[in-house]
Amino acid sequence: MNINLLKTGTTLLNALSNHSELIMQAYFTGNVNEAEYSPKVIQNLIDLKVLWRPDAEVQLRLRPSLRTLLEESLQDEHNRQIDANIGNLLATLTTQAEHYKESIANQRYHDAKAYLADLTEHVYTLTETLSTNVRLLWSRISNEFGYVGSVDAKIRENELAQGQVTDMLNQLSMFRFDELSQLAGSQRELRHLLVITLQSSFVTSTQELSLVQSKLIELLGRFREFQGRTRLLKGFMLHMEQQPDFQPSNYGALSDIPALFNVANPVIKQAAVDVNNVEHEFELVSLVGHIRTINRHWFSQEKTQSDAVRIEQETEVTLSDDKLKMAVEGYFCDVIESGQNMTALEYYQKNDLEFDPEAWIYQVIGAYHGLPDQDRQYLEIDPIGRPDDIFIGNFLITDIEIGLR
């Protein structure tokens, strides 16, 4: 432990605590009124890198790093800016990972531990930066840029946010997880940091940014609608100020009525089913489920004599179970009797079933989940497949294995 750094850090924190009112005043007003404080206090804070003077003719201000800390701690979304500089962080991660691998190869484990600590800090800083940027965008959207007063200012803030989203998406495109995986190699710590942690944050941020982008476009359309109505209202008010004695004409007395006033009252449109409305899906399914097919035989009016009714002895009608359902039940019974795990396709090939293999697997899955709870607890289902090559998070099931618990 470095004793000098410890003492300097303690002195800095004590100064922040003792002069908290000065610091918060500088945070909200943007500068420090030096006449209200002693020169000794001001010089002490300058020496501790809390205050600084950008120019000789400019008043003292807070250091940007301290302002960023206060914005993060206070969750002050009014002043915070989005940090989309991901390229430098990725380059730093690559360099730190190379230092770590070189130290491990040369058996300098103390240096490797230090490099791994720095790498871990940079990775979590990057993930926190991504989540903070997304949270900041959602905060702006939630209050519809309420920290600005006019509609024009809201439109400018919306366009700025859209540009920041585009920049973040371009920065996220710099992630090359195949290269990061090769860089990590067989090092478990590196794979956890560079592949698992970063990929999880990348997927979450990309999905959130796509939702943010669509919401910003929706808000921009609403703001432009407000802007158009505001301009129309301001134009009418200006017209009334210039011509206070203006009286609208009696358009009903004119022989040629303007098209704007010659509009008939709206009529009720013919009812029609909106199959694209998700909220009506339950009602539509319920209506379709109650439909019954009615077949009527229409006879010609010239046919007056009906056919003779033949009364025969009723024959017993038996309803046989579905063959696919019976085959699945036989599959379950075979697994229980043998006590050995068996996949659905193995049973399918063993018994030369004639069903479609995909329909057979679907029926096995549905039959398993349709079993009563007391019966399902004796069996265990295990899907067999592989992750999708294109879409992350999709798992393609190629077979199902059933066994006893």
Image (cartoon, grey):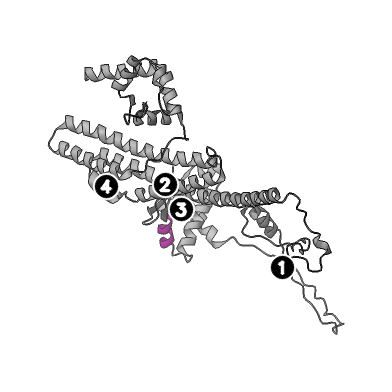
Q: Is residue 346 magenta?
A: yes
Q: In terms of secondary structure, where does tag 1 sit? A: loop
Point out the tag, 1 or 4, that comes first from the N-terminus.
Answer: 4
**Amino acid identity at mark 1:** Thr
Secondary structure, magenta segment, majority class? helix
Q: Nearer the viewer, mark 1 or mark 2?
A: 2
**Amino acid identity at mark 3:** Asp
Q: Quadrant of the N terminus?
A: top left
**Amino acid identity at mark 4:** Ser
At which x and y percent is residue 270?
74, 64
Q: Seen from this angle, which residue lies furthest bottom?
A: 302
Point out the tag, 3 or 4, that comes first from the N-terminus.
Answer: 4
Judge whether residue 41 can be spotted in this image: yes
Which residue is denoted by mark 3 in the rendering? 334
Q: In terms of secondary structure, where does tag 3 sit? A: helix
Up/down of 78 relative to 364, above or below: above
Query: Which numbered circle lies on residue 181?
Result: 4
Q: In terms of secondary structure, where does tag 2 sit? A: helix
Up/down of 8 relative to 148, above or below: above
Up/down of 41 relative to 82, above or below: above
Q: Nearer the viewer, mark 1 or mark 4?
A: 4
Judge whether residue 381 can be spotted in this image: no
Which residue is denoted by mark 1 in the rendering? 315
Apparent side of residue 117 relative to residue 22 in the rendered image (left or right): left
Rounded to the nearest angstrom, the CA distance separating label 1 from label 2 is 77 Å
